[in-house]
Image (tube, rainbow, N blue to C red):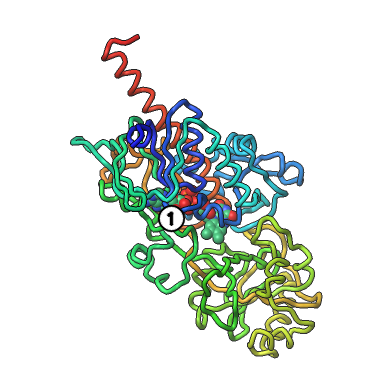
Amino acid sequence: MDEQLLNTDVAVLGGGLAGHCAALAAAEQGASVLLLEKCAEPGGSSATSAGSFALAGTDLQAAAGVEDSPQKLAEELMRVSGGHAEPALVQMYVERQADTYEWLKRHGVVFHKITLSSSTSVPRTHPTNSRQLISALHERVMNQPLIRYLPNTRATRLKVDGDGRVRGVHLQSGERRWETTVRGGVVIATGGFSRSRDLIRKFAPELSSAPAWGGAGNEGDGLTMAWALGADVADMGFVTGTFGVAINHYPDTEARAGDELLLRMAMYRGGIAVNLDAQRFADESLSYKKLATACLYQPRGIAFQIFDQAIMDQSVANPSVNDFKGAFDKGVIKKADSWDDLAREIGIDGPALQETVRRYNGFVSTGKDLEFARESLSGGFGRPVALQTAPFYALPCSAAVLSTYAGLRVSTAMQVRNVFGDTIEGLYAAGEVVGGFHGAGYMSGSSLGKAAIFGRVAGAQAAERAATKSALEQRQSGSP
Ligand SMILES: Cc1cc2nc3c(=O)[nH]c(=O)nc-3n(C[C@H](O)[C@H](O)[C@H](O)COP(=O)(O)OP(=O)(O)OC[C@H]3O[C@@H](n4cnc5c(N)ncnc54)[C@H](O)[C@@H]3O)c2cc1C
């Protein structure tokens, strides 16, 4: 077996956004890197995501006349987390977001016009096309001579020495198994655990029967491997679903092989959400995480995003959550010229839907939502709008487990901490596998932001440790 597979400065486990950023950052410091991806294709959840980054104070915001600042972003991240986020991690995110945005652009990532999404008081969602995001970074990885990328290769266990320092990783590719020794460190970037029924049952049993999406390889491998070494975890009690996942073949609610995940959020453009009884069940401006929990309590866990032509006219391709036209063209969004006909299309009571919309439009005109106190489009931004321009639309949807946003406790250098608060030497983590950043809530775009920012820090720190160790070894051996 060739030497680079047996010895490396840095091993990065997982080829999603965090893994790509960690690998590139480590190589940019001169470290040799093994980037391991369990699946055949790189990208994980990052490649299927809506591609939005939560950033503040950018040129794109200035161009749209949006006033924002890193300080405001920090305050809102803390508020949205319900005070559970670790302030040091939030501060680190905010301090590194501007240069990470520039770094991503330098690596070929294209950002589109900013938009408003969930839990932000101003438009600060910076959309990318998630496929373009990953393919641009993957191309850089493949052209970087210091990085060796191995698809279809799964990390199975971490190797530790007698003092508990991480010394390497056990790997498996098909029938082949081997161990790689690392000089600097192992970066866990294996994503969340949305695809592990076992971990979901353990930490969020109420989601056990919710559909699971997210990267096919996101089974919590890195979390479990670090856990086996005594790693501490954070935010596990806050794992929730995501509202707005289309039911592709409604009224058939079963997913079919080859189904595409269509996540759409017409409620943040002014749509409402109703249940099978044609009743609203929440303030639609709330975070899609909170709406998910509310949706799971509705009859059969089914909801409809209801909107009109004025909202359909705001459809854009990026971010994909606002691509209503695309979902309509795929036959997932239903359309009718009257509320009654729309209700018939989706099999709910016509007069009830008509009455719900009439009451809601009345609330909009008086400025007082007497049912759910909705005051904005999303997160306090924008005013609710009446639904009155035919034709009308309905998106059958539900809550699903897309991302888990909870996991390993880390220092600001992305070193994994054990249950006693000490760092586990040689072990770093980045991306969705990290806990302690989102807390009890979730700001849209903050997970891709976190994957890129924390990934860069983790890779650079592991590379620095490798450089320090080799300088030390050289001094000890007396070489110049
Ligand atoms: C539909 C959807 C839409 C989303 N939209 C947004 C959004 O717009 N903005 C936002 O901020 N967040 C969004 N998210 C969340 C966000 O995409 C993820 O949190 C983020 O991409 C995680 O990045 P990551 O690199 O940590 O993990 P991933 O991108 O999931 O990558 C992890 C990789 O590790 C691999 N892996 C796992 N175990 C092993 C192992 N043992 N050995 C080797 N490899 C392994 C996996 O196969 C995977 O490729 C969305 C998520 C989904 C599912």
Badge count: 1
Q: Quadrant of residue 316?
A: bottom right
Q: Nearer the viewer, residue 230 or 154?
A: 154
What's under tag 1, amino acid-wise?
A: Gly
| Crowd tier of the residue under label 1, counting other residues whose Cα lies within 10 Å: few below 14, some 14–19, many 20 or above | many
- The quadrant of the picture occupied by the N terminus is top left
Residue located 38% across and 60% down the image: 237
Residue 146: x and y in percent read: 47, 30
Residue located 48% across and 26% down the image: 29
Q: Please tell me whether residue 111 is drawn above or below residue 425 in the rendered image.
A: below
Horizontal side of 70 relative to 3 (left or right) equals right
Q: Please tell me whether residue 112 is drawn above or below residue 377 in the rendered image.
A: above
Mark 1 secondary-structure assignment: loop
Q: Please tell me whether residue 193 is drawn above or below residue 10 in the rendered image.
A: below
Q: Please tell me whether residue 471 is drawn above or below residue 164 in the rendered image.
A: above
Residue 402: x and y in percent read: 49, 62
Q: Nearer the viewer, residue 461 or 44?
A: 44
Q: Quadrant of residue 358?
A: bottom right
Horizontal side of 349 relative to 465 (left or right) equals right
- The quadrant of the picture occupied by the C terminus is top left
Q: Is mark 1 within 8 Å of ligand 1?
A: yes
Do we see residue 331 in this rendering?
Answer: yes
Q: Which residue is mark 1?
A: 192
Residue farthest toward the right in the current orientation of the protein = 389
Do we see residue 83 in this rendering?
Answer: no
Residue 411: x and y in percent read: 38, 39
Residue 461: x and y in percent read: 42, 32
Q: Quadrant of residue 397?
A: bottom right
